[in-house]
Amino acid sequence: MKHSKLYRMRKILLFAFSVFVRVYWYKFTKKPPAKWEQLWSKIGRDFRETLFDLEGLLIKIGQLLSIRADLLPNAFIKQIEDLVDHVPPSSWDDMKSVLESEWGAPIEDVLKDVNRVAVASASIGEVFKGTLKNGVEVAIKVQRPSIKEIIDIDFRSLAIIIWFADRFAPVPKGFINFKMLFQEIKRVIEREVDFKHEFDTIIKFKKRFANIGRLHIPQVFEEYSTSSVIVMEWVEGNRVTDIAFLEKNQIDRRELSRRLFRIFIPQWLEAGVFHADPHAGNVLVRADGTLVLLDFGMVGEITKRDAANFQTLLQTILLKNHPKTVEVLIDLGFLTPDADRKAIENLLKEMLAFNINELKEMDPFAIKKELSEIFYSLPVQVPTRFVFLGRSFVTIEGMLHTINPDQELVDVVKPAFLEWLNQSNQKKWKAILEWAIIQPISQFLHPVYELIEAPQRAIEQKQLMKQKELHFSMYENQKKQAFVLTVLGIISIFTGQYLASTFIYNGGLIVGSVSILGYIISSVRQIKWRRQYKR
């Protein structure tokens, strides 16, 4: 029943419709912030229940939405932030049929033996442990037989919801680019469903980190891997955050942290793909201290243009070249081309009132946190690839805290950062670092009162900047919705006359009358607001 097309679409659309109704009702009745917090928490719980009821693609969508704190209310995010992509396994006969179909031969011709109980079972595929004919133990990742049909159904449902939200969601125009959000989610999931992408990513990682010692990335077997099956070397190890294991094997935790951070620095700052889901289950450690990276299904990519823009962005921030900073943010996709550049420049001027010497003393995680707070406070929609990048950064930060709870992170990561800087051909990063070190204090030291007052002024300026667009868009949305309801009311009136149905006729008359009245009221309020705003 869960995979029935009609059932899934009805369940998804009814949930989305219920959210719209509840949100509009709360706006109409002007509920206080505490009530809104309760509403979004309840919507989050309902969403979570719907995900686990329908399984399939929706759990993956839930995971992607759980990292969009830049777009969704915190109360909603809290209910889904710990979603685990684990669903009951399919029957062995179904998975066996997929294997034999993809291999074009009986399973016995490829495998010496296989454990029929999945060692991992997620929404898109399952993993089995087996042994090849030559005796090599392998992990076999198999796509669920019905997943592509489910994805097609769910994307159709999601497209309807996005279309409706783009036109009728009670948010300021341009505040959330629903179409871009949908396309990014679709692109991420379609990439993850095609196992050829994961195969190619593993090959790229093996080549990229071939010269890094004490790092193991599983070997993949091309002759047995397809778009629906991927066969790779079976790897044993413990979670890198297993402190008892580290102590038992006398693994130097500080040195382990340095190596872990060294592996991810080039992924974050250089052009290429990066591991977007490096949780403790995907980062293992062996008894000899060797690190193991697993599961390359979810990755992001930094283009050469992105990497150059990152460097330019840091330069413009250090130089306080705010017009150029805005240009870079637009080029990176954080701001739309029609954004109010002057207003954002003024906001940046207030928010970036820092002392360059304080910046030298900050660790990379603190700098990242400050930049994140700036981005989230601006009227931006962070592209998904950068959300993945941020999640990767935060996840590794959490691991380092767990591995070295008593160590300052700057002392742990600084040697790895300097090692990367010296070994890589990153001349621009070196130039930025050297430039920051030699600057005199007086050139960048703002008056104390400016530093104290800047946060409050930034908040006030941000609110003023958004207020105009917020009010105008709200009134425009109300008028648009009233117009649509008026048209539906007129259609209902004619339909009632044609069918000689008093109920339909009267219903259309009521809807049309109320919506016309609503349109007039919204127009009057908008005119009054414009006059007040000008004053």
Image (cartoon, rainbow, N blue to C red):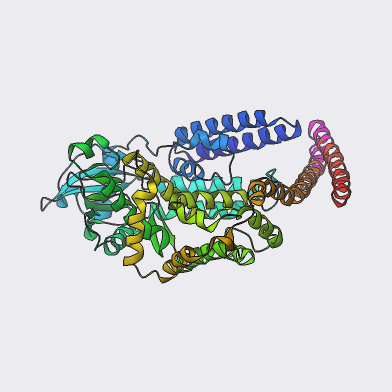
Q: Is residue 66 visible?
A: yes
Left or right of residue 12: residue 418: left
* Percent coordinates x, y for residue 531 in the rendering: 89, 49
Image coordinates for residue 315, horizontal then vertical, percent: 53, 65
Instruction: Examine the structure image and report whether residue 507 is included in the region drawn in magenta.
Output: yes
| Residue 17 sits in quarter | top right
Q: Is residue 86 left or right of residue 222?
A: right
Quadrant in which the N terminus is drawn: top left
Query: Which residue sits furthest left?
Result: 134
Q: Residue at x 59, y 35 (%)?
A: 14
> Residue drawn 27% across and 48% down?
256
x and y percentages locating residue 88 in the rendered image: 35, 34
Residue 407 screen position, x and y as percent: 35, 42
Does the magenta stretch mainly form a helix, a strand or a loop? helix
Query: What's drawn in magenta, residue-wise?
Result: 492-510
Q: Nearer the viewer, residue 120 or 347?
A: 347
- State yes or no: residue 213 in magenta: no
